[in-house]
Each structure stands twice: as structure tokens, then as C-alpha cells.
Amino acid sequence: MRVLALTGSHDRNGFDCGVEALNLWLRQTALQHQAKGISRTFVAVPQDARETEAYRVAGYTDMVATSILGYYALASAFILADELPPELAKRYPRQIPVTRLGRLAVRDALQGQGLGRLLLADAVTRSRNAALSVGSAGIFVDAKNGAAARFYIEYGLTPCTEEPLKLYLPLW
């Protein structure tokens, strides 16, 4: 697979992660936000025709070259140091520039196969690279639920003391 910036040619309508709010955001909002500079969405798609065909042979009969396997969105944001656990908060000034991981979703039929981990790694890499040019102390996530929070914790994000569905990963 490869991870690319979302374009109008990707099949947003064919994506279903099992969470309607995430499906609708991808279909109706992602490109609008991109055009306005609000966020950037990155999609995992099949690498080439051979990979697309391999998915089809494996039973994913609706898979095409423009099918979205998963996606995530990044945006610049500020958080207050008070939102972080005390051991992290003491390292920062009152307001902290961060990269917000706004959404991360994997096609329903492909969940549990490691694609979410790969998308998170790609998001961290892109965030770190961007932070080399534009200040960002870390990645901030608002997890949708406890299961999502546990996913992020497994990969090193720290839950905030007062709100455990808010998580943070320092980049430095």
C-alpha cells in the first residue's frame, strides 16, 4: 500500500470503517477542509494493480485502484499545558503548538491487521517532519472512546490526567 494526500479521485463513497461519523467526515468534509487549509487528510490506497487484484482475489470484490483502505487527518493546533499530565506540562510554556491527529480510521473489513498502526506511524513521521520547519511540540489526539484510547496508549501516547480520552505524544 501507499499513503497519499487525499484527492478528489479517491473513492471516498466506498469507504466504510463502521463508524458513520468518520465515514461522513471523509465523504463530506475532508476535501473542503483541505481546500481551506484547515486540515490535511492522507489515505492508504493499494500500491498498484497487482495489489488491487490480490485484494479482489482475497474476497474484497469491490476493491479498485482508488479504494481507500484507511485514512487520517492532521491539523495545527494549540493546547494549554494544563491539559497535559503534570510531568509533561512542566516542560512547556502555558500554550503549546501541537499537531492534532483529528481522525484515524481503517476500512471495516481490514481492521485488526496492522493498518491502523502503519497509519499512526505515518502520521507521526509527517508530523515530526513538519515540526522541523514549523514549531510543534507533539501530537495531540482526542480519542473517540476507550478502545481508541487504548490503541493510542499501546503506541506510546500518554493520556491526560483530567480527560483520559485526550492523549499526547511529545515529538522531542
Image (cartoon, rainbow, N blue to C red):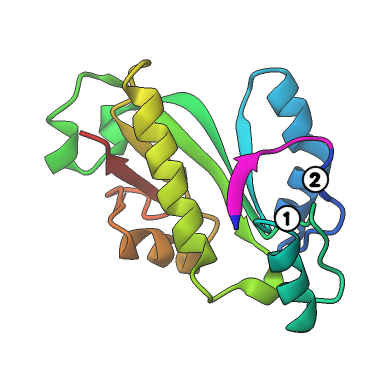
Q: What residue type is labelled 2?
A: His
The one nearer the camera, 168 or 36, is 36
Asked whether residue 97 appears in the rendered view, the answer is: no
Instruction: Identify the residue shown where x is 37% and y is 29%.
Output: 129
Numbered disc 2: secondary structure: loop
The one nearer the camera, 32 or 83, is 32
Numbered disc 1: secondary structure: loop
Dot 1 surroundings within 10 Å: few (below 14), some, or many (20 or more)? many
Asked whether residue 11 appears in the rendered view, the answer is: yes
Q: Which residue lies furthest to the front in this view?
A: 50
- Bounds of the magenta segment: 2-8
Cα–Cα span, label 2 and label 1:
7 Å
Q: What residue type is labelled 1?
A: Ile
Query: Is 4 in the magenta?
Result: yes
- Asked where in the image residue 70 lies, by quadrant, the reply is bottom right
The residue labelled by disc 1 is 68
The residue labelled by disc 2 is 10
Earlier along the polypeptide chain: callout 2 or callout 1? 2
* Above-or-below relation of 22 to 40: below
Q: Quadrant of the N terminus?
A: bottom right
Instruction: Identify the residue shown where x is 53% and y is 29%.
Output: 75
* Above-or-below relation of 61 to 31: below
